Amino acid sequence: MKVLYKKISDEIKSKIDNGELAEGDMLPKETELCKMYNVSRPTIRAALMQLVNLGYLVRIKGKGTFIKKTQILEKTTLFIESFYEEEKDRIRTEVLEFRTVPAEDHVAKQLEIKPGDPVTKLTRLRYLEDEFDTGPIVYTVSYFLDELSFVQHYDLEKQTIDTTLRQHGVYRDIVEKEIMTEYLDAKKSRLMGVGENELALFVKAIIWDKTGRIIEYAESSYPANRNKFILRVRL
Protein backbone atom coordinates (compact mmCIF):
# COMPACT_ATOMS: atom_id res chain seq x y z
CA MET A 1 0.00 0.00 0.00
CA LYS A 2 1.33 3.44 -0.95
CA VAL A 3 2.29 5.54 2.07
CA LEU A 4 0.18 8.62 2.76
CA TYR A 5 2.63 11.36 1.82
CA LYS A 6 3.28 9.70 -1.56
CA LYS A 7 -0.46 9.66 -2.27
CA ILE A 8 -0.60 13.38 -1.56
CA SER A 9 2.52 13.99 -3.64
CA ASP A 10 1.02 12.06 -6.57
CA GLU A 11 -2.24 14.00 -6.32
CA ILE A 12 -0.48 17.38 -6.43
CA LYS A 13 1.75 16.18 -9.28
CA SER A 14 -1.35 15.09 -11.23
CA LYS A 15 -2.86 18.57 -10.82
CA ILE A 16 0.36 20.09 -12.17
CA ASP A 17 0.51 17.67 -15.12
CA ASN A 18 -3.10 18.32 -16.18
CA GLY A 19 -2.80 22.09 -15.84
CA GLU A 20 -5.04 22.49 -12.82
CA LEU A 21 -2.02 24.00 -11.10
CA ALA A 22 -0.09 26.31 -13.45
CA GLU A 23 3.43 27.67 -13.57
CA GLY A 24 3.99 30.28 -10.87
CA ASP A 25 0.96 29.27 -8.79
CA MET A 26 1.62 29.33 -5.07
CA LEU A 27 0.48 26.33 -3.06
CA PRO A 28 -1.54 26.88 0.12
CA LYS A 29 0.43 27.11 3.36
CA GLU A 30 1.43 23.85 5.04
CA THR A 31 -1.15 24.40 7.78
CA GLU A 32 -3.89 24.78 5.16
CA LEU A 33 -2.73 21.67 3.30
CA CYS A 34 -2.86 19.75 6.58
CA LYS A 35 -6.55 20.65 6.91
CA MET A 36 -7.28 19.90 3.24
CA TYR A 37 -5.80 16.40 3.41
CA ASN A 38 -6.50 15.77 7.11
CA VAL A 39 -2.89 14.80 7.83
CA SER A 40 -0.04 15.98 10.06
CA ARG A 41 2.46 18.64 9.07
CA PRO A 42 5.38 16.17 8.74
CA THR A 43 3.33 14.23 6.17
CA ILE A 44 2.70 17.40 4.14
CA ARG A 45 6.36 18.43 4.38
CA ALA A 46 7.48 15.02 3.12
CA ALA A 47 5.03 15.20 0.19
CA LEU A 48 6.21 18.68 -0.80
CA MET A 49 9.87 17.74 -0.43
CA GLN A 50 9.40 14.82 -2.80
CA LEU A 51 7.97 17.19 -5.42
CA VAL A 52 10.81 19.66 -4.85
CA ASN A 53 13.31 16.84 -5.41
CA LEU A 54 11.49 15.84 -8.60
CA GLY A 55 11.59 19.40 -9.90
CA TYR A 56 7.86 20.16 -9.74
CA LEU A 57 8.01 22.70 -6.92
CA VAL A 58 10.38 25.38 -5.69
CA ARG A 59 10.48 26.81 -2.18
CA ILE A 60 11.27 30.51 -1.77
CA LYS A 61 12.16 31.47 1.77
CA GLY A 62 9.76 34.00 3.24
CA LYS A 63 7.33 33.68 0.33
CA GLY A 64 6.08 30.12 -0.06
CA THR A 65 6.07 27.06 -2.34
CA PHE A 66 5.49 27.58 -6.05
CA ILE A 67 4.91 25.51 -9.19
CA LYS A 68 8.07 25.47 -11.31
CA LYS A 69 8.11 26.52 -14.95
CA THR A 70 9.62 23.34 -16.34
CA GLN A 71 9.08 19.81 -15.20
CA ILE A 72 11.60 17.01 -15.37
CA LEU A 73 11.56 15.13 -18.67
CA GLU A 74 14.18 12.63 -17.62
CA LYS A 75 15.67 11.65 -14.33
CA THR A 76 17.82 14.52 -13.12
CA THR A 77 20.61 14.07 -10.62
CA LEU A 78 21.52 16.93 -8.34
CA PHE A 79 23.66 16.13 -5.36
CA ILE A 80 26.59 17.23 -3.34
CA GLU A 81 29.14 14.51 -2.82
CA SER A 82 31.86 14.76 -0.24
CA PHE A 83 35.09 12.87 0.06
CA TYR A 84 33.38 11.08 2.94
CA GLU A 85 30.72 9.70 0.59
CA GLU A 86 33.28 8.67 -2.02
CA GLU A 87 35.29 6.81 0.61
CA LYS A 88 32.46 5.53 2.81
CA ASP A 89 33.86 1.97 2.90
CA ARG A 90 36.97 3.35 4.60
CA ILE A 91 35.15 5.44 7.19
CA ARG A 92 35.53 4.69 10.88
CA THR A 93 33.32 6.17 13.60
CA GLU A 94 34.09 7.34 17.12
CA VAL A 95 31.07 7.88 19.37
CA LEU A 96 31.59 10.73 21.82
CA GLU A 97 28.13 11.02 23.36
CA PHE A 98 25.03 8.83 23.22
CA ARG A 99 22.22 9.60 25.68
CA THR A 100 18.74 10.97 26.23
CA VAL A 101 18.52 14.74 26.65
CA PRO A 102 15.73 17.35 26.70
CA ALA A 103 15.27 18.91 23.26
CA GLU A 104 16.60 22.45 22.97
CA ASP A 105 14.38 24.96 21.20
CA HIS A 106 16.10 24.73 17.80
CA VAL A 107 16.09 20.92 17.88
CA ALA A 108 12.43 20.76 18.91
CA LYS A 109 11.53 23.08 16.05
CA GLN A 110 13.24 20.86 13.46
CA LEU A 111 11.76 17.62 14.86
CA GLU A 112 8.37 19.30 15.32
CA ILE A 113 8.11 18.40 19.00
CA LYS A 114 7.91 20.50 22.16
CA PRO A 115 11.02 22.07 23.74
CA GLY A 116 12.11 19.87 26.62
CA ASP A 117 10.69 16.67 25.12
CA PRO A 118 13.18 13.78 25.40
CA VAL A 119 15.35 13.03 22.38
CA THR A 120 18.32 10.74 21.80
CA LYS A 121 21.51 12.72 21.18
CA LEU A 122 24.37 11.07 19.28
CA THR A 123 27.69 12.87 18.82
CA ARG A 124 30.27 11.33 16.48
CA LEU A 125 33.63 11.90 14.82
CA ARG A 126 34.31 10.20 11.47
CA TYR A 127 37.78 9.24 10.23
CA LEU A 128 39.29 7.74 7.11
CA GLU A 129 40.60 4.32 8.14
CA ASP A 130 44.11 4.62 6.69
CA GLU A 131 44.48 8.33 7.45
CA PHE A 132 43.55 8.22 11.14
CA ASP A 133 46.52 10.37 12.15
CA THR A 134 45.31 13.16 9.88
CA GLY A 135 42.32 13.68 12.15
CA PRO A 136 38.52 13.52 11.80
CA ILE A 137 36.90 14.55 8.52
CA VAL A 138 33.49 15.29 10.01
CA TYR A 139 31.91 16.09 13.39
CA THR A 140 28.20 15.26 13.61
CA VAL A 141 25.54 15.73 16.28
CA SER A 142 22.30 13.85 15.57
CA TYR A 143 18.98 14.00 17.42
CA PHE A 144 16.37 11.23 17.19
CA LEU A 145 12.76 11.09 18.31
CA ASP A 146 12.28 9.48 21.71
CA GLU A 147 10.43 6.58 20.02
CA LEU A 148 13.78 5.66 18.46
CA SER A 149 15.71 5.60 21.75
CA PHE A 150 16.35 1.89 21.14
CA VAL A 151 19.34 2.96 19.01
CA GLN A 152 21.21 3.59 22.28
CA HIS A 153 21.41 -0.17 22.81
CA TYR A 154 23.60 -0.66 19.72
CA ASP A 155 27.30 -0.15 19.09
CA LEU A 156 27.25 2.49 16.39
CA GLU A 157 31.01 2.33 16.00
CA LYS A 158 30.43 -1.07 14.40
CA GLN A 159 26.95 -0.73 12.93
CA THR A 160 25.36 2.10 10.96
CA ILE A 161 22.29 4.04 12.02
CA ASP A 162 20.54 3.00 8.83
CA THR A 163 21.05 -0.71 9.57
CA THR A 164 19.93 -0.26 13.18
CA LEU A 165 16.71 1.52 12.20
CA ARG A 166 15.90 -1.04 9.52
CA GLN A 167 16.18 -3.83 12.10
CA HIS A 168 13.28 -2.14 13.87
CA GLY A 169 11.20 -1.54 10.76
CA VAL A 170 12.11 2.14 10.38
CA TYR A 171 13.21 3.14 6.88
CA ARG A 172 14.78 6.48 6.02
CA ASP A 173 13.25 7.96 2.88
CA ILE A 174 13.88 11.69 2.33
CA VAL A 175 16.62 14.01 3.53
CA GLU A 176 16.57 17.80 3.28
CA LYS A 177 19.96 19.47 3.66
CA GLU A 178 20.86 23.10 4.23
CA ILE A 179 24.52 23.83 3.48
CA MET A 180 26.46 26.89 4.65
CA THR A 181 29.90 27.83 5.96
CA GLU A 182 31.07 28.32 9.52
CA TYR A 183 34.19 29.00 11.53
CA LEU A 184 34.82 26.15 13.96
CA ASP A 185 34.42 27.08 17.61
CA ALA A 186 36.87 26.11 20.34
CA LYS A 187 35.14 22.81 21.17
CA LYS A 188 34.91 21.56 17.58
CA SER A 189 38.46 22.72 16.84
CA ARG A 190 39.81 20.82 19.84
CA LEU A 191 37.93 17.61 19.02
CA MET A 192 38.92 17.71 15.36
CA GLY A 193 42.52 18.74 15.94
CA VAL A 194 42.43 21.89 13.83
CA GLY A 195 43.05 25.55 14.52
CA GLU A 196 40.29 27.57 16.15
CA ASN A 197 38.20 29.52 13.63
CA GLU A 198 39.14 27.07 10.86
CA LEU A 199 36.73 27.38 7.93
CA ALA A 200 34.28 24.48 7.55
CA LEU A 201 31.12 23.51 5.75
CA PHE A 202 28.16 23.31 8.13
CA VAL A 203 25.33 21.03 7.05
CA LYS A 204 21.89 20.81 8.67
CA ALA A 205 19.87 17.71 7.75
CA ILE A 206 16.24 16.75 8.40
CA ILE A 207 15.35 13.12 7.70
CA TRP A 208 11.90 11.63 7.10
CA ASP A 209 10.95 7.96 7.21
CA LYS A 210 8.68 6.24 4.70
CA THR A 211 5.57 7.14 6.70
CA GLY A 212 6.31 10.86 6.28
CA ARG A 213 7.45 11.30 9.88
CA ILE A 214 10.49 13.41 10.74
CA ILE A 215 12.73 11.03 12.69
CA GLU A 216 16.12 12.74 12.84
CA TYR A 217 17.79 16.14 12.81
CA ALA A 218 21.56 16.40 12.40
CA GLU A 219 24.25 19.07 12.29
CA SER A 220 27.62 18.24 10.70
CA SER A 221 30.86 20.19 10.38
CA TYR A 222 33.35 19.37 7.60
CA PRO A 223 36.75 21.15 7.90
CA ALA A 224 37.52 22.66 4.51
CA ASN A 225 41.13 21.46 4.50
CA ARG A 226 40.08 17.80 4.92
CA ASN A 227 37.14 17.54 2.54
CA LYS A 228 36.25 18.24 -1.05
CA PHE A 229 32.72 18.73 -2.32
CA ILE A 230 31.62 18.22 -5.91
CA LEU A 231 28.35 19.50 -7.37
CA ARG A 232 27.03 17.59 -10.37
CA VAL A 233 23.96 18.67 -12.32
CA ARG A 234 22.47 17.04 -15.40
CA LEU A 235 21.23 19.88 -17.63
Image (tube, rainbow, N blue to C red):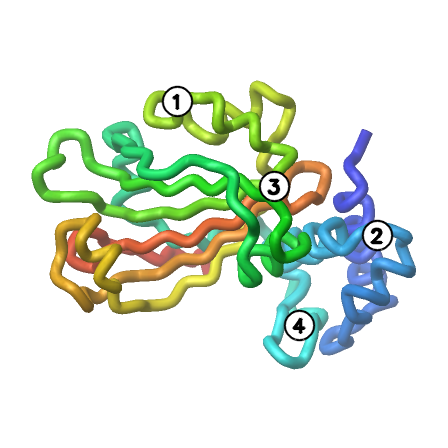
Compare residues 91 and 109 and report the one nearer the observer. 109
* Mark found first going from the N terminus, 1 or 2: 2
Instruction: Indicate the secondary structure of the residue bearing disc 1.
Output: loop
Q: Residues within 10 Å of mark 3 (few under 14, many from 20)?
A: many
Q: Which residue is mark 3?
A: 145
Closer to the N terminus: mark 4 or mark 2? 2
Q: Secondary structure at mark 3?
A: strand
The residue tagged with tag 2: helix, strand or loop? helix
The three-letter amino acid code for the residue at tag 4 is Lys
**Image-based side of 46 in relation to 196, left or right:** right
Q: Is residue 212 above or below residue 103?
A: above
Q: Are marks 4 and 2 in contact (CB under 8 Å)?
A: no
Question: Looking at the rendering, which quadrant does residue 230 occupy?
Answer: bottom left
Give left or right: position of 9 versus 74. right
At label 1, the amino acid type is Asp
Q: Earlier in the sequence, mark 3 or mark 2?
A: 2
Residue position marked by numbered label 1 in the rendering: 155
**What residue do we see at 25% from left, 63% from top?**
184
Q: Are marks 4 and 1 in contact (CB under 8 Å)?
A: no
How far separated are the C-alphas under marks 4 and 1?
47 Å
The residue positioned farthest toward the top in the image shown: 167
Question: Residue 13: x, y in percent?
Answer: 77, 56
Which mark sits nearer the N-terminus, 4 or 1? Answer: 4
Specify the label residue 69 is tagged with. Answer: 4
Label disc, if present, on residue 11 of the rendered structure: 2
Question: Label 1: few (<14), some or many (≥20) within 10 Å?
Answer: few
